[in-house]
Amino acid sequence: MTVILGLPSKGRLREKALERFARAGFPLIEPEDARLYRAHVEGEPDIEVRFLSAGEIARELAAGFIDLGVTGEDLVRENIPDWANRVKVEARLGFGHADVVVAIPEVWYDVRTMADLEDVAADFRTRHGRRLRIATKYWRLTQEFFSRTHAIQVYRIVESMGATEGAPASGQADIIVDITSTGSTLTANHLRVLSDGIILKSEACLVGSIREREAGDAALLARITEAF
Amino acid sequence: MATLEPDFAAQLLAFLDAKQTERIDMPVLQPADPFLDMAGESLRGRIFLTESETGDSLCLRPEFTIPVCRDHVASGVSVPRRYAYLGEVFRQRRAGGSEFFQAGIEDIGDTDNAAADARSLADALDLVTTIAPAAEWRVTVGDQAIFEAVVSALGLPRGWRRKLARAFGTEGQIESLIAALGRPRAAPRDLPKPVADALEDGDAGGLLDAVAGCMEELGFTAASGRSAGEIATRLIEQTILDRARLSPDEVAVLRDFLGIRVPLAEAERALRAFAGRLVDGDGETMGDVIAAFAERVARLAERGVALDRFIYDAAFGRPLDYYTGLVFEIAPRVITGKVEAGIPSAIADSPRNAGVAPVVGGGRYDRLLTLLGAESPIPGVGFSVWIDRLDEARITRQGARQEGAS
């Protein structure tokens, strides 16, 4: 009988997550060797802690390899197909705030809203011989927002695994969908968020994996989530 | 293991051959880009994508129309062709398996639109009736050109006309546009001073220079992206769009039009009556498209097709930019296996209204071949049949008959 907890392995997210667990009454005993990616909770022999990247936590939750984890809501919604049936957001943790947004070149003065962007996208092929290109690592969120929420059908996604903000200036894409916390990187790259272009207001969440468990594990999990 | 191929395949192929068509087969592995370019990114989640060794994006063919049209363009033939196909397609659906058969006829290059439209409608109805004679088929017909004429008759600027034309067929979308057109809009804008000044003065040349200046300063010089001219033109267009609004009467006219749903035989009269309500002079643009519509119906009647199975639904369209005129769907009136009681009212039991999945989808796609690279415009009209749904209609209806008899 063990409950496996996945926590972010580095940076501010790790710090904040440990802080929140301590405050909730589950202080972690960190490994003596900081390079070890496992830990325990004081007085809770049945909780095993694993340090993983936030992306891996989302994936492992979906697969059911870990029971509970701290990860970004953007990663849950983007990386887990049919996420609502596979994981449950138990608590929003109030840190790691960031928005997934649609940003366009600042000089597109004629584009203020998604409706304007729809006009531009519809004409794009006639004018430029290709579809409007969107650089992003958020395939799923982009498709849902463009195709379903705003009925924009004609665009192409260009996968971008990093430095997405540079794509419009370098000509790899026309606009981007990316995550931003302060907006300063967008501004530095002369990009502007559309007035109705916020796809998701994300933050770090305590997320549980939905599956059948033995009574003892379920009770332990309930005790942890209730403490948040 | 049950075979996926329908047991009426031979009958179906004989039917297609008898329609003076040329049977065509397409590779299962297709380049993915044409499908994503034509149908949009939302298709990506539903098709089966893979990659060639050289990194080209490939997919299992999700449908036949685009490959058939690409093949036609590549072959460079200049005479009209009638292509027929029966084969497996691969697409994830809300209901049913992801591999299923489709059959269809694509009529490419015939410039007599009314005749080709009528033939496509007649062939499609004939096909489902031949395979499932016991089912009661209903054909719902829409027309993109009529809607565009109505919008144009309302005197809206080009930008709004195009916006509405794109939303045509998506109920929520068209409704929110009409609502937006009915209320005044403030246009707060946060523009750099030179741009704002030139726009205010209506100085087109100055505006272009101001936008170009800002672009250069901020480093947006990508050759393939939007140009300063494009942005400046649209800024001016936008001030016109912002001012364009419909009066409550005009909004009502547009809504009334979208509410027209009549038996096809009465559609011309209903459309003429509607056109009569529009303010003076606007009847003319409507006149032409109504005449074309009536011509199509006349050609259909000449073929001896029973028109009482056809319904004209003014709001029916497809939000894909290559459809240009006729669109249609065929579905059985009864799908639950229960025989509906009472006298059929052609309108009330329109399958489209009941949310019944169509067995046939068809339409005119005059823009598609140009989008796929044809040098001069080539007209096209065609339809596809979902074989599994056709089979279901066949079996359900036969079952219903037998139960009724016992």
Image: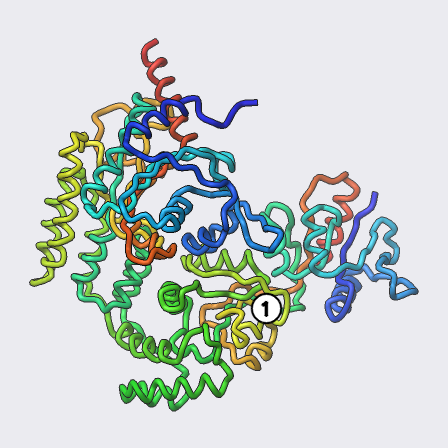
Mark 1 secondary-structure assignment? strand
Q: To which chain does the residue with label 1 belong?
A: A
Residue situated in front as seen by the camera: A32 or A228:
A32
Q: Residues within 10 Å of mark 1 (few under 14, many from 20)?
A: many
Residue A32 lies, in percent from the top left, at 92, 64
Q: Is residue A57 left or right of residue B220?
A: right
Question: In the rendered image, which quarter contains the N terminus of chain A?
Answer: top right
**B16, above or below A117, in the image:** above
Question: What is the quadrant of residue B202 in the picture?
Answer: bottom left
Residue situated in front as seen by the camera: A207 or B1:
B1
Q: Is residue A192 left or right of residue B71?
A: right
Q: Is residue B205 left or right of residue A33?
A: left
Instruction: Kindly identify the residue that appears in the image at 47 percent across and 55 percent down.
Output: B41
Residue B278 lies, in percent from the top left, at 11, 59
Q: Which residue in the protein does label 1 denote?
A: A179
**A220, above or below B357, in the image:** below
Residue B200 lies, in percent from the top left, at 30, 87
Q: Please, what is the three-letter code of the amino acid marked with disc 1? A: Ile
Question: In the rendered image, which quarter contains the C terminus of chain A?
Answer: bottom right
**B96, above or below B368, in the image:** above
Q: Is residue B32 left or right of residue A40?
A: left
Instruction: Kindly identify the residue that appears in the image at 35 percent across and 36 percent down.
Output: B84
Residue situated in front as seen by the camera: A89 or B151:
B151
Question: What is the quadrant of residue B385 in the picture?
Answer: top left
**B360, above or below A45, in the image:** above
Q: Is residue B360 visible?
A: no
Instruction: Kindly identify the residue that appears in the image at 28 percent across and 31 percent down.
Output: B19
Residue A28 lies, in percent from the top left, at 84, 61
